[in-house]
Amino acid sequence: MKKCQSIVPPPNDPWYSPDMNITDPSHSAAEKSEFSSSEYQKMAKALNELWETLWNKEELDLEVLNHDGLKERLSELEIPKHATQQASLIGHMEKSGLLGVSKLVNGQNPSSTIIAEFGCGRAELSRYVARSQFLTLAETNENQRTQSHRPFFLVDRAGPRMKFDTKILKDYQCDIDKILAEEKEKSFNKDIKIPPPFVKRALIDIKDLNLNVALNNLFPNDLNSDVVAISKHLCGCATDLTLQCLANNTSTLKSIDKPTMTHKLKGLVIALCCRQLCTYETYPLVGRKFLIDSGLITTPDSFRLLTKMTSWALCGRRDDMATDEESVQNHFSGLSIKEREVAGFLARRAIDHGRLLSLCDMGYQSKLIRYVSPETSLENVALIAQ
Ligand SMILES: C[S@@+](CC[C@H](N)C(=O)[O-])C[C@H]1O[C@@H](n2cnc3c(N)ncnc32)[C@H](O)[C@@H]1O
């Protein structure tokens, strides 16, 4: 008999711990698939109330940053959509002290920082983080350069082709050669000693990842180092699984003395997307309490309704679309296009706000920002904690 290709055997890595990062495993998926127009309208009204009372009718700050690590890349591209996002995310990492290149403290090099990229895909974000770290290190004093150590942990449940894992090391060699050539030209003849980055990848669903065990096994020389979690477009519940994975497997600012946890969460920069894929059983419990207390949800079904409405924020308006009045009659929600767009953005904001509160509860100074303009990407919100 032929083996079925769709059945993937469970990994036998020691860090595979089935479902350990699902926040509420007692709950099984919500049943209801259809909602009435009055349910949609009630949700839209509750979201508008939050807009007025909690967010004072203010949009998230737009803060587009940059980093020299992407300068060359940006100049090569005609449509630099992804590079612009990467540059801003890395700019925010640097601004929040999360780039993983620490300053010497009293002449000492503090322990290294592991950059963990969740839902990394081909790991292009890590590639440019490594490059940005390199450029920052090249500017620092020799002692700090030589002692620097830059571990990267890449996590994805899929194994895409054309990964950048080895390219990260090739970039490093190119940069070293370039700097050496420049130094030679200036006849400084100085050796630039910056150790290469150290990259490991795990093919695993974040829901099953025991991060503590993975880091201890894959980075045995980095016990006790800090962890910075990063991601660009970590879809739906993968963000929530990541938050739970970090809460379960690192010591946080609030629970600093978890004796079994080897690593401390220093902070995170995660660009969010696809809230319609969030699920009740994986969403943070602190966030769930916020949604319940603010009258948005009462049941797993109403959570699903909220997630469903988030996709309205991105449906886009076309010239040939119905007028507002016609669109009310044509849509199952009984809401106009404009009302649906607004409700979609506010539903996204509510889901993200619950995530923000869960990080505040872990002791972190946290914020949500628009890290690129909507022209660059409509999925332009990042969650930052430090
Ligand atoms: C939208 S893609 C972004 C990929 C990459 N970060 C980028 O910017 O190109 C989302 C990635 O997250 C991964 N992903 C989604 N859910 C996941 C999960 N539960 N565990 C691990 N990886 C996940 C997908 O396989 C995919 O590679």
Image (cartoon, rainbow, N blue to C red):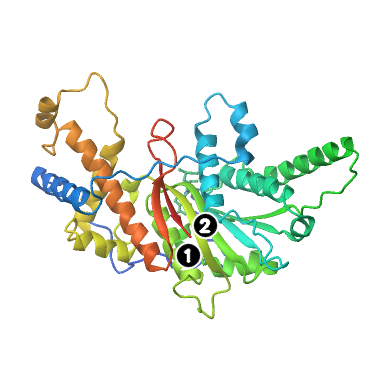
Closest to the observer, 110 or 293: 110
Give me the disc on residue 246. Answer: 1
Please, what is the three-letter code of the amino acid marked with disc 2?
Ala
Please, what is the three-letter code of the amino acid marked with disc 1?
Leu
Earlier sequence position, callout 1 versus callout 2: 2
Q: Are marks 1 and 2 in contact (CB under 8 Å)?
A: yes
Closest to the observer, 141 or 209: 141
Residue 273 in the image: x percent, y percent?
A: 39, 45
The answer, for residue 165, to whether it is visible in the render is: no
Residue 355 in the image: x percent, y percent?
A: 35, 58
Give me the disc on residue 255. Answer: none
Give the quadrant of residue 178.
top right
State whether residue 216 is above or below residue 36: below
Q: Residue furthest top?
A: 320
Q: Residue at x 88, y 47 (%)?
A: 190
Give the quadrant of residue 322.
top left
Label 2: element kind: strand
Is 192 situated left or right of 164 in this image? right
Is 86 situated left or right of 280 in this image? right
Label 1: element kind: helix
Is 134 situated left or right of 75 in this image? right
Cβ of disc 2 within 8 Å of ligand 1? no
Mark 1 Cα within 10 Å, few/some/many (few <14, many 20+)? Answer: many
In the picture of the structure, the residue carrying the numbered disc 2 is 229
Give the quadrant of residue 26.
bottom left
Distance in Å between CA atoms under marks 1 and 2: 8 Å
